[in-house]
Image (tube, rainbow, N blue to C red):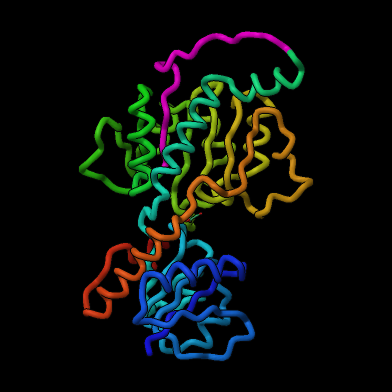
């Protein structure tokens, strides 16, 4: 019988994923991996933040499937041997959720809804100036499946949207595209709301820092729904405290859960959510993975393979 290993650190989640996979396929058996599990000679592994031991133990793996879009925690090419192909979830219902989250962040920033929430707590009736969209150019860092949907959804609200990507794209639908290191400063300088959906790689770690924040238009806003390590926390805090930034909406953090003593929790202007901006939808994700496994079994190459050089 063909075996698929499911390695998700939270065992309850692992069971829920296993249930969902079982509903997709009766040709395969699904096994939940724990550090105590003996080797079973699995053919494929489905993982979320997998422990290294798994790859030392399971020597028959033909491919690994990540349950999310971001593969930064996997150690592709290091923990996972270079020759073992890794596939990420492509969209899996995440792009639409993240577009909505971005829209929420844009409206929160421009409409000052965080300020109104604080005013309500004080029973204070005070109006603020209405939004002039032309004064709020939005810039999206990352223009893959997620970034494109985020940028285009915000553009549909009537904001001027640009995106920044590593390389040129053909389909940009109303979004001005900046590419490569050469156009990064130009992109930041025209941006007031900076939205981050980049993959976390050696090239993007710490990309939201004192220098890049200083290039944004004054009274800006940051929405981070990629990875916490894209941000230099002290630099972001300093920018909010000095009013260089109006605030930030943050879904991801260096350490998750965000430690109780972290200053982000209580900083006026900073809104926190617990890594929920884009959650892989179970049915779409399991169906997508089983489809890719079927292609591999037929000797075909599925899409979404992680490039070990680019790290995403
Ligand atoms: C979520 O953070 C993901 O990478 O899918």
Residue 152's place in the image compared with 72, above or below, is above
Residue 288 in sight: yes
Q: Which span of residues is magenta-colored?
A: 124-141
Q: Residue 237, located in which quarter of the rendered image? A: top right
Q: Main secondary structure of the magenta part?
A: loop
Where residue 60 sits in the image (x, y, percent)? Answer: 41, 88
Q: Is residue 269 left or right of residue 141?
A: right
Rendered residue at 40%/79% (across/down):
44
In the image, taking residue 111 as reference, residue 41 lies left or right, namely left
Q: Is residue 137 magenta?
A: yes
> Which sits in the foreground, 131 or 104?
104
Q: Residue at x 45, y 21 (%)?
A: 136
Q: Quadrant of the C terminus?
A: bottom left
Q: Position of residue 210 (x, y in %)?
A: 59, 37
Relative side of 291 to 223, left or right: left
Query: In the image, what residue occupies the spot 45% across and 67% down?
Result: 20
Picture quadrant of residue 255: bottom right
Query: Is residue 245 magenta-colored?
Result: no
Q: Is residue 53 above or below residue 191?
A: below
Q: Nearer the viewer, residue 300 or 123?
A: 123
Q: Quadrant of residue 33?
A: bottom right
x and y percentages locating residue 240 in the rendered image: 65, 29
């Amino acid at each position: 019988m063909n075996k698929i290993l499911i390695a998700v650190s939270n065992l309850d989640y692992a069971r829920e994923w296993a249930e969902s996979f079982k509903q997709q396929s009766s040709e395969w058996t699904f096994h939940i991996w724990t550090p105590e599990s003996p080797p079973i000679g699995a053919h494929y592994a489905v993982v979320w933040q997998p422990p290294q031991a798994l790859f030392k133990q399971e020597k028959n793996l033909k491919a690994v499937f990540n349950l999310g879009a971001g593969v930064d925690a996997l150690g592709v090419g290091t923990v996972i041997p270079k020759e073992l192909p890794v596939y990420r979830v492509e969209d899996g219902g995440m792009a639409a959720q993240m577009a909505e989250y971005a829209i929420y962040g844009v409206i929160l920033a421009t409409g000052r809804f965080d300020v109104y929430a604080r005013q309500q707590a004080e029973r204070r009736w005070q109006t603020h100036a209405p939004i002039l969209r032309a004064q709020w150019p939005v810039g999206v860092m990352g223009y893959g499946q997620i970034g494109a949907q985020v940028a285009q959804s915000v553009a549909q609200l009537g904001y001027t949207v640009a995106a920044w990507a590593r390389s040129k794209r053909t389909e940009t639908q109303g979004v001005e595209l900046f590419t490569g290191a050469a156009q990064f400063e130009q992109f930041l300088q025209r941006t007031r709301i900076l939205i981050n959906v980049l993959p976390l790689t050696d090239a993007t770690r710490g990309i939201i820092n004192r220098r890049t924040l200083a290039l944004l238009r004054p009274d800006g806003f940051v929405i981070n729904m990629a990875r916490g390590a894209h941000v230099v926390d002290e630099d972001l805090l300093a920018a909010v405290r000095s009013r260089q930034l109006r605030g930030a909406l943050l879904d991801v953090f260096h350490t998750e859960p965000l430690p109780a003593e972290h200053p982000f929790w209580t900083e006026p202007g900073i809104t926190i959510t617990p890594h929920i901006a884009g959650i892989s939808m179970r049915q779409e994700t399991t169906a997508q993975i089983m489809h890719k496994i079927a292609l591999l079994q037929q000797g075909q190459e599925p899409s979404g393979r992680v490039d070990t050089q680019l790290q995403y």
